[in-house]
Image (tube, helix red, strand yellow):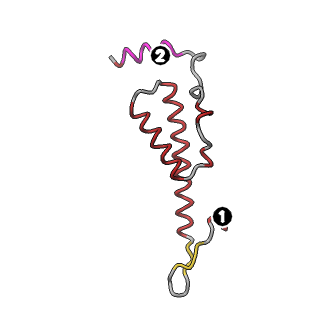
Amino acid sequence: MRQSILHNSQALLTPDCITAKPLGMDEQAPDIAGMSFEQALKALEDVVRRLEGGEVPLEESIGLYERGETLRRHCQARLDAAQARIEKIVAGPDGRATGAVPFDAG
């Protein structure tokens, strides 16, 4: 059954009907670069939930996958920055943390 569906779908896909992103996705998507880690993680979980649900049309699934990958990279960058900050915690003479050097301070 699945092969016949895929076979029929292949016949319908022409360069004219394929779009890079689902219509309206850019208008609905908040700027990922401005998201906190928690916001991006929640958005990524929503994308995964929709894709795993299996009810999203193919073209929208492709756009969701692309958005999910962008969200994943954003979350990873936030985690990497947090890790770098943790590694730069400054210890006082007694060995206790006295502060942290900002990540971008080099």
Quarter containing the N terminus = top left
At label 1, the amino acid type is Asp
Rendered location of residue 70, percent (x, y):
56, 42
Above-or-below relation of 66 to 73: above
Crowd band around label 1 with a 10 angstrom C-alpha radius: few (<14), some (14–19), many (20+): few
Rendered location of residue 42, percent (x, y):
48, 46
Crowd band around label 2 with a 10 angstrom C-alpha radius: few (<14), some (14–19), many (20+): few
At label 2, the amino acid type is Gln
Asked if the magenta segment contains residue 83, the reply would be no
Left or right of residue 34, residue 95 in this image: left
The residue tagged 2 is: 10
Residues at discs 2 and 1 in contact (Cβ within 8 Å) = no
Q: Which mark is on residue 37?
A: none
Above-or-below relation of 85 to 78: below
Rendered location of residue 21, percent (x, y):
58, 28
What's the magenta region?
3-13
Asked if the magenta segment contains residue 10, the reply would be yes
Q: Residue at x 51, y 46 (%)?
A: 72
Distance from disc 2 to disc 1, alpha carbons, whole Å, reads: 49 Å
Q: Residue at x 57, y 17 (%)?
A: 17
Quarter containing the C terminus = bottom right
The residue tagged 1 is: 104
Q: Nearer the viewer, residue 29 or 3?
A: 29
Q: Residue at x 53, y 49 (%)?
A: 39
Nearer-N-terminus badge (2/1):
2
Q: Nearer the viewer, residue 7 or 42?
A: 42
Q: Residue 80's image quarter?
A: bottom right
Rendered location of residue 7, percent (x, y):
42, 15
Please tell me how many numbered marks the rendered image carries.
2
The secondary structure that most of the magenta stretch takes on is: helix
Question: Which type of secondary structure does the marked residue at label 2 adopt?
Answer: helix
